[in-house]
């Protein structure tokens, strides 16, 4: 019988009889962690810590807004005034109070457990961002479970966990990581309500869990960064209503009770800041910020339609 392959030269390594696929180890690991939800959550938690913690304690403030958020929170803790937001001698009404409350809670907790000079350590102010980033990863897994298998949900969570932008925001004492946490929670609850309606599950007595998560997440997002989260949820609802030519499923969100609950969570601080500063907060957070950005964009020749987008984003 004629050989159709070249014989190896003397001393050269021979081809292995059983080829090793490096991907098999990854497949076996994913199979092991997706046996149960508890294992999957623990695996994603470990991945989040491994990816977000390097540099978390040692990187100095690298963003001017991070230093301003931290300083405003420090003054809030020192003064004991958790309504007004001040940066040095001026008011800081760029964002609502939510992130300052979270950072204040981190500082107070660190001081309570005996951490020396907790108010002077920038990483203490980053703890809400770290929690928000890891929470967004876990909520991505929870949201994806409404659409795909447990394995697919783990891969979806790993994709966002490996995001460079999320890794940066997890190390900054700012609003974006916590905002992402509230947005993913709201969208996951919205997906469950919509898919439950599509499947015709329990039309007379829909569960209260997803609506409660949805409206609470909206309230948290508003307190952290204003109406931006309403744009995400609102545009999604409008798109689904157009696609289905109806929005009967919205009643499963318990809109009457949900709006009341959201107002209970959001209105007290807005009323207090209005009583404290009048309309200054609303003028500075919306009007003043928008005018400064419009001026900057006009100097660069940006189209007028970009102005309203900047208003919502910032």
Image: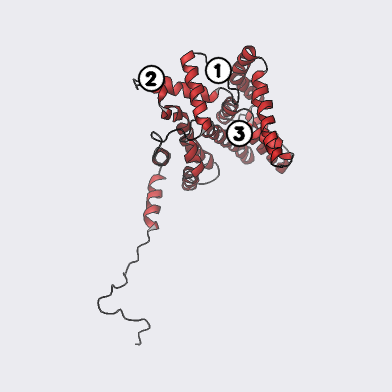
Residue found 38% across the figure and 61% down from its top: 21
Depth order, front residue of 135/40: 135
Q: Position of residue 111 (x, y in %)?
A: 38, 19
Query: What colouring does the structure picture have?
Result: secondary structure
| Furthest residue in direction bottom, as rendered | 1
> Which residue is disc 1 drawn over?
89
Which residue carries the number 3 mark?
A: 202
Q: Which residue is mark 2?
A: 111
Image depth: mark 1 or mark 3 in front: 1
N-terminal-most mark, 2 or 1: 1
Mark 2 → mark 1, Cα distance in angstroms: 25 Å
| Residue in view at x 42 percent, y 30 percent | 123
Report whether residue 249 is seen: no
What element does badge 2 sit on?
A: helix
Q: Quadrant of residue 219?
A: top right
At which x and y percent is residue 165? 51, 42
Q: Earlier in the sequence, mark 1 or mark 3?
A: 1
Quadrant in which the N terminus appears = bottom left
Of tags 2 and 1, the one toward the viewer is 1
């Amino acid at each position: 019988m004629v050989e159709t392959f070249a014989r190896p030269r003397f001393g050269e390594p021979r081809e292995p009889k059983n080829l090793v696929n490096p991907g098999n180890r990854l497949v076996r690991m994913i199979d092991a962690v997706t046996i149960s939800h508890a294992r999957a959550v623990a695996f994603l938690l470990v991945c989040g810590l491994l990816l977000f913690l390097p540099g978390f304690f040692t990187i100095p403030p690298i963003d001017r807004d991070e230093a301003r958020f931290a300083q405003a929170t420090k003054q809030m803790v020192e003064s004991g005034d958790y309504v007004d937001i001040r940066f040095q001698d001026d008011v800081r009404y760029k964002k609502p109070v939510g992130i300052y409350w979270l950072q204040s809670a981190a500082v107070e907790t660190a001081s309570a457990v005996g951490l020396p000079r907790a108010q002077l350590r920038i990483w203490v102010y980053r703890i809400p961002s770290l929690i928000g980033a890891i929470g967004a990863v876990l909520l991505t897994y929870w949201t994806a479970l409404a659409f795909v298998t447990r394995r697919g949900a783990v891969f979806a969570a790993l994709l966002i966990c490996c995001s460079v932008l999320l890794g940066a925001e997890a190390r900054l004492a700012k609003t974006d990581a916590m905002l992402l946490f509230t947005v993913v929670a709201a969208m996951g609850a919205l997906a469950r309500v919509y898919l439950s309606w599509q499947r015709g599950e329990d039309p007379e007595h829909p569960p209260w869990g997803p609506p409660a998560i949805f409206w609470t997440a909206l309230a948290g997002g508003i307190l952290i960064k204003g109406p931006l989260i309403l744009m995400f949820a609102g545009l999604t609802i409008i798109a689904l209503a157009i696609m289905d030519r109806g929005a009967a499923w919205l009643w499963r969100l318990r809109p009457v009770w949900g709006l009341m609950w959201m107002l209970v969570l959001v209105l007290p601080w807005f009323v207090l800041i209005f009583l404290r500063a009048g309309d200054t907060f609303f003028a500075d957070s919306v009007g003043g910020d928008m005018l400064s950005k419009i001026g900057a964009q006009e100097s660069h020749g940006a189209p007028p339609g970009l102005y309203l987008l900047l208003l919502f984003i910032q």
